[in-house]
Image (cartoon, helix red, strand yellow):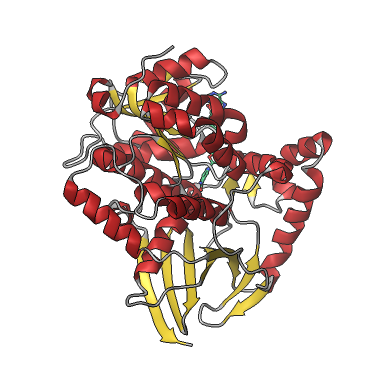
Amino acid sequence: MAEIINPGSRSTKAYDVVILGASGFTGKYVVREALKFLNAPNSPLKSLALAGRSPSRLSETLKWAAGPNSTPPEIPLLTADTSDPDSLARVASQTKIILDCVGPFHLYGPPVVAACVEAGCDYLDITGEVDFMERMEASYHDKAVESGSLVISACGFESTVAEIGLLFHSRQWGGPSVPNRVDAYVSLESGKRIVFNYGTYESLVLVAANAHKRARPVIPGAAPPKDTPIIEYQKQLGLWGVKVPSINSAVIRRTQATLAENPHGLPGANESVEAVKKREEFWSRAKLPSHFGEKLGLKSLFGLIPIMIFAIFLLVLSKSRVGRWVLLQFPTFFSLGLFRKSGPSEEEISSARFKLWFVGKGAGTKVVTRVTGPEIGYVATPIILVQCALVVLNDRAALPKGGVYTPGIAFGLTDLQKRLQDNGISFDFISKKSI
Ligand SMILES: NC(=O)c1ccc[n+]([C@@H]2O[C@H](COP(=O)([O-])OP(=O)(O)OC[C@H]3O[C@@H](n4cnc5c(N)ncnc54)[C@H](OP(=O)(O)O)[C@@H]3O)[C@@H](O)[C@H]2O)c1
């Protein structure tokens, strides 16, 4: 059994961060983003290693991430395979944090979480697979509390933008008024096609196949209203809102559940008296709504047609083994071009942007806020994951000693929002009026 290391003995670790799955489509963008902060002035990232199955693919990744005109930095390349627990234990024992980019997480995530929890190292990932996140919480939370391992999933566009965006929204209410409900509208824009890589498609097929098995966490208080329309026009946003299954809603429900049990947030591993006071004030003022819902925001209802066709293929075919095989063989056909085995081109990535609107209503008041940023999968997600890692390196004493948590409850009080803002993801107040 590996030695259990608490946050106090983290200084003995060889690396601040190891990026696992660095050779993947998303992983290589995470490496490129992390290199910007490696040994940069004021950056807590002093040592980095890449891990994966193939040293030659990791080496190619490093060359690509350094850019065509630079010599790649000397970064250790570690061999690790999720089917080899010893290789994961070796990596976890050498680093403070593992950034896991190996998906589908449903298949490959559990042994990585297990190795981190066993070694007492922190774990962040970019999954959007709700079933995986909830399973990890049920299986590893108590052990992670004990070993001092912080396990935080969904540190990418899903679901950190929605979590930090909702906290930003709740701070715009001021005075005694509180939102009863907040509806978010996500809109993706591009001058070219919006395309995602096969890895996300594969994860989506598995999520659809296992959706019926998921037990929902119990949230104290009244059940959310069920009377919201499936399609509605939001005049102020100029968008049609279409109800879809939402990863963000599921993650925010877990944050609300944790907050209901811990109204003053989670105690830090080693907090000062001032830090305790600041945390208690922050969370007792956080006005999270009793209901959060998310809708797809479309400029035209014609945009709904390909999404519905893809959703029908996904729902019908993902239920059988043969159906899943067919779906996985022909991603571009079944997703009507939304997913591609070779992933999006650099031009497609650089021309895409997102807007996530928050419309809150309560006590005769309506507040609208918005988060905007670059392409979600391979620009925003690496920015967010790397900034989450920097927060953990900088502020470890203020974060819980260990446990499996959502990004909102773990990072809500930290400077993550400011960091995201400084790196191109902007949080804006739009309007407040009586209704
Ligand atoms: N939250 C978000 O908004 C967001 C954004 C982007 C991506 N994602 C998620 O990130 C995941 C990865 O997506 P992707 O498009 O980057 O996929 P990908 O290109 O297929 O990359 C997968 C990576 O996992 C590695 N891998 C596969 N099996 C492994 C194993 N047994 N042991 C160790 N490493 C293994 C691969 O390494 P090899 O080089 O050895 O094959 C590769 O580096 C997906 O689940 C996707 O949904 C989430």
Q: Is residue 284 visible?
A: yes
In the image, what residue occupies the spot 77% across and 42% down? 318
In the image, what residue occupies the spot 50% across and 48% down? 377
Q: How many marks?
A: 0
Residue 72: x and y in percent read 31, 28
In the image, what residue occupies the spot 47% across and 15% down? 87
Query: Which is nearer the eye, 134 or 31?
Result: 134
* Vertical order, 396 against 298 (above or below): above
Q: Residue furthest bottom?
A: 435
Residue 216: x and y in percent read 63, 48
Query: Which is nearer the eye, 67 or 381?
Result: 381
The image quadrant where one finds ligand 1 is top right
Residue 210: x and y in percent read 71, 41
Horizontal relation, residue 226 to residue 3: left or right: right
Residue 259: x and y in percent read 43, 53
In the image, what residue occupies the spot 49% across and 25% down? 114
Looking at the rendering, in which quadrant would you find the N terminus?
Answer: top left
* Vertical order, 178 against 74 (above or below): below
Q: Is residue 342 visible?
A: no
Displayed quadrant of residue 340: top right
Displayed quadrant of residue 106: top right
Horizontal relation, residue 150 to residue 347: left or right: left
